[in-house]
Each structure stands twice: as structure tokens, then as C-alpha cells.
Amino acid sequence: MLQNYTLLLEASADQAKKGGGSLIVSLLPMILIFGLMYLLMIRPQKREEKKMKEQINAMRVGDSVVTIGGVVGKIMNISDDEITISTSVANTMMTFKKQAISTVIQSEENKKIVEKEKAESGEPEKERVLRSV
């Protein structure tokens, strides 16, 4: 009876030696799925978050904003982490954290100012070089 167990252990050891690559092959689909999820879901979300942070940091007095609660208004004052917006015809002033902003709509004046600053700092030339490569 002890010999039967020994034979079974030897047989399973031989199969383990032969199928050593089977672990990698069985994990490969899972690795591919996680890689695909990263490319299709996580990476674009991080790109959107980065774009939103840039928009919030580029806000200026006079721009229109939409909060995550749906309040639309024009920026009247910007402090460290808060903005004050004017809403409705009665010029109701409301203060929000910058984190509560979902959309920034730049005014025409501020668009011109931003384009002028980019031209002075040389950023458009960098973009052209990257696009041509």
C-alpha cells in the first residue's frame, strides 16, 4: 500500500515537471484582460482628470463655470481653493470649492489672453514639433 502512494507521488511530480509552463499559460489570459482594462478604462480616465485639473488651474475671473450640482455662473473671485460665482440676473454670489467645478467655459477675452501667453512662452512651437514627429 505504501508503494502505491509512492508511485502516485512520483507520477504527480513527473506531471508537474512536464507542465511547468502551464501556470504561465493559464495566467496569461488574466494578465491580458487586466492590461486591456487599463488601456480602455483607467488610462483615459486619468487623462480626463489631468485635463480637468489644467482647466481648473487656468480659470480666470470672467469665465463661466458649471458645478457638479448643476449651478451655472460667472467667476467673480478666485482664492486658493475656492471660487465665488455670480448666478442669475439678481447676481446671487455663491462660493464653491474648486473641486466642485465640473466644466469651465472660457470667455473670449480670456481665450485671447491665454493664447497670447502661450505665444510669449513658446508653447505653440513645442506642440508643432510634437505633432510633426
Image (cartoon, helix red, strand yellow):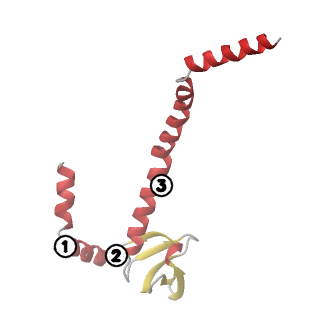
Is the C-beta separation of discs 3 and 1 under 8 Å?
A: no
Q: Is residue 6 above or below residue 109?
A: above
Residue beneath disc 3: 45
Which is more foreground, mark 2 or mark 3? Answer: 3
Q: Using the numbered discs, state the Cα–Cα distance from disc 3 to disc 1 in whole angstroms.
A: 29 Å
Marker count (numbered): 3
Question: Callout 1: helix, strand or loop?
Answer: helix
Mark found first going from the N terminus, 3 or 1: 3
Question: Which residue sits at x=45%, y=84%?
Answer: 80
Q: Using the numbered discs, state the Cα–Cα distance from disc 2 to disc 1 in whole angstroms.
A: 21 Å
Question: Dot 1: within a 10 Å radius of its alpha carbon, few (fewer than 14), some, or many (20 or more) residues?
Answer: few
In the visual, does 107 lie left or right of 104?
left
Question: Callout 2: helix, strand or loop?
Answer: loop
Q: Quadrant of residue 46?
A: bottom left
Query: Along the line of sight, which residue is nearer the eye, 31 or 5?
Result: 5
Residue beneath disc 2: 107
Question: Which residue sits at x=53%, y=26%?
Answer: 25
Q: Is residue 133 above or below residue 67?
A: above
The amino acid on which the numbered mark 1 sits, given as a three-letter code, is Ser
Question: Dot 3: within a 10 Å radius of its alpha carbon, few (fewer than 14), some, or many (20 or more) residues?
Answer: few
Which residue, as the protein is rendered here, is positioned at the far front?
A: 2
Mark found first going from the N terminus, 2 or 1: 2
Q: Quadrant of the N terminus?
A: top right
Q: Is residue 20 above or below residue 94?
A: above
Query: Along the line of sight, which residue is nearer the eye, 114 or 87?
Result: 114
Question: Callout 3: helix, strand or loop?
Answer: helix
Q: Using the numbered discs, state the Cα–Cα distance from disc 2 to disc 3 in whole angstroms.
A: 26 Å
Residue beneath disc 1: 121
Mark found first going from the N terminus, 2 or 3: 3
